[in-house]
Amino acid sequence: QVRLVESGGASVQAGGSLRLSCVASGFTYSPSYMGWFRQPVGLPREGLAAIDSDGLTSIAESVKGRFTVSQDSATNTLYLQMDNLNPGDSAMYYCAAAPRLVRMSATQAIGSIASDKNYWGQGTQVTVSS
């Protein structure tokens, strides 16, 4: 059974940093991509970052220069480093993984990372105060 467990969300002040983690387990295949999306209260999901099976990454323009995605294959952990946070970054943050048989590069996946067809975790809350 596929499981994605996010952690690292917190309440921080503007200008601060957080690193979110997502531990993946139960995969019987290697997802072609994994990544992060967020959903503020009352607003649509927003894809933030993707990393593909070649280790290439893609970051959404809205957070480029502040957010970085990385992974540790040895521990099956995906990370999202978030710097210079602002109140507009307040949201529930989710880790996502591609379903079996879907093949996409990171550049292609950034537009699909928030899809209902992906596996998701339960989310971790980030709140940024001014």
Image (cartoon, rainbow, N blue to C red):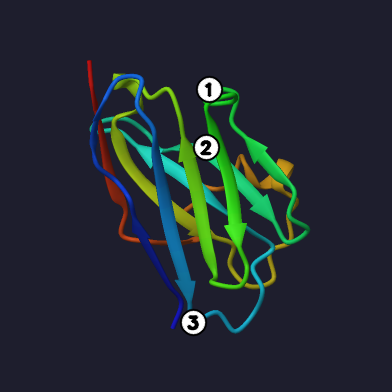
In the rendered image, which residue does mark 2 sit on?
A: 48
Residue at image coords 64%, 67%: 31
24 sits to left or right of 12: right
How many badges with numbers are in the image? Answer: 3
Res. 123 in view: yes
Location of residue 108 (image quadrant): top right
Residue at image coords 53%, 22%: 62
Res. 114 in view: no
Residue at image coords 44%, 67%: 23
Q: Could you say where residue 107 lies in the image, as x and y percent from the top left?
A: 72, 41
In the rendered image, which residue does mark 3 sit on?
A: 26
Local SS, label 1: loop
Label 3 sits on what residue type?
Answer: Gly
Instruction: Find the distance from the CA under tag 3 to the CA under tag 2.
Output: 24 Å
Q: From what the image shows, is residue 2 above or below residue 63? A: below
Few, some or many residues within 10 Å of mark 1 (<14, 14–19, 20+) = few
Q: Could you say where residue 78 lies in the image, as x and y percent from the top left?
A: 52, 58
Label 1 sits on what residue type?
Answer: Ser
Q: Earlier in the sequence, mark 3 or mark 1?
A: 3
Q: Are marks 1 and 2 in contact (CB under 8 Å)?
A: yes
In the rendered image, which residue does mark 1 sit on?
A: 62
Classify the position of the C terminus by image quarter. top left
Q: Could you say where residue 103 lies in the image, as x and y percent from the top left?
A: 74, 61
Instruction: Find the distance from the CA under tag 1 to the CA under tag 2.
Output: 8 Å
Local SS, label 2: strand
Few, some or many residues within 10 Å of mark 3 (<14, 14–19, 20+) = few
